[in-house]
Amino acid sequence: MEIFTAAGFSALLQVIAIDLVLAGDNAIVIGLAAAGLPAEQRKKAILIGVLAATVLRICFAAVTVQLLLIVGLLLAGGILLLWVCWKMWRELRTSHADELEATEALSDTDFDADHAVAGKTPRKTLGQAALQIVVADVSMSLDNVLAVAGAARDHFSVLIIGLVLSIALMGLAASFIARLLYRHRWIAYIGLLIILYVALDMVYRGALEVWPHVNNAVS
């Protein structure tokens, strides 16, 4: 299998790191949106978020893999991932207070001993939270699938493993990963560097792919 080659194994490690960081990032967004709800509605909102992220990843995976075969879209995907890196960088530099609120909401645990779970977030309705979660899920699921497809390159088995892992992490371990990234910030920074490398690689390979067509058009 491809994963037992040096290139395949390297791609697999990149894909695992990307899945871990982006699943945690997605979970924190879901938790923060749900944090402003009463306790009885919070679990419903989190369930909506996790299910939406899972379904969207499956749908985007089916489409993105085919789209990246079209000349020019690899370059466009790389540029989009560069924007994702910038967005992640800004999120990593935000205060830990928001992340604490999100992690408390996901785990239903009072980590800061203030006698309230996610008690500092402004109140909202279930409808407002669900809309906020689904809109964020659309963007973040596309980011995840695009990054996995870019890291896997031509290793189809690595791509499949990465997409299955992405879905499993969101469905089964979102809360655990959010807590892990909150406590160990350096994991998120390593993941950001890997995604940046994948984005630059996609831009480079996409530019090489597009250049002959541009050259012929100019000639």
Image (tube, rainbow, N blue to C red):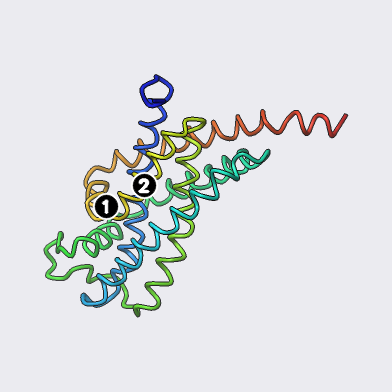
Label 2, on which residue?
Answer: 166
Q: CA distance from mark 1 to mark 2?
A: 14 Å
Label 1, on which residue?
Answer: 178
Residue lying farthest front?
1
Q: Position of residue 105 (x, y in %)?
A: 24, 65
Q: Assess disc 1: are there few (<14), some (14-19) or many (≥20) residues with their C-alpha within 10 Å of its C-alpha.
A: many
Amino acid type for the residue under numbered disc 2: Ser
Which mark lies nearer to you, 1 or 2? 2
Specify the quadrant that holds the C terminus: top right
Q: Is residue 176 above or below residue 49?
A: above
Give SS at disc 2: helix
x 51%, y 32%: residue = 153
> Tag 2 or tag 1, which sits nearer the N-term?
2
Q: Is residue 73 above or below residue 176?
A: above
Amino acid type for the residue under numbered disc 1: Ala
In the picture, residue 30 is in which quadrant? bottom left
**Relative to 135, is 66 on the left or the right?**
right
Give SS at disc 1: helix
* Residue 116 or residue 179, whichever sits in front: 179
Residue lying farthest top?
6
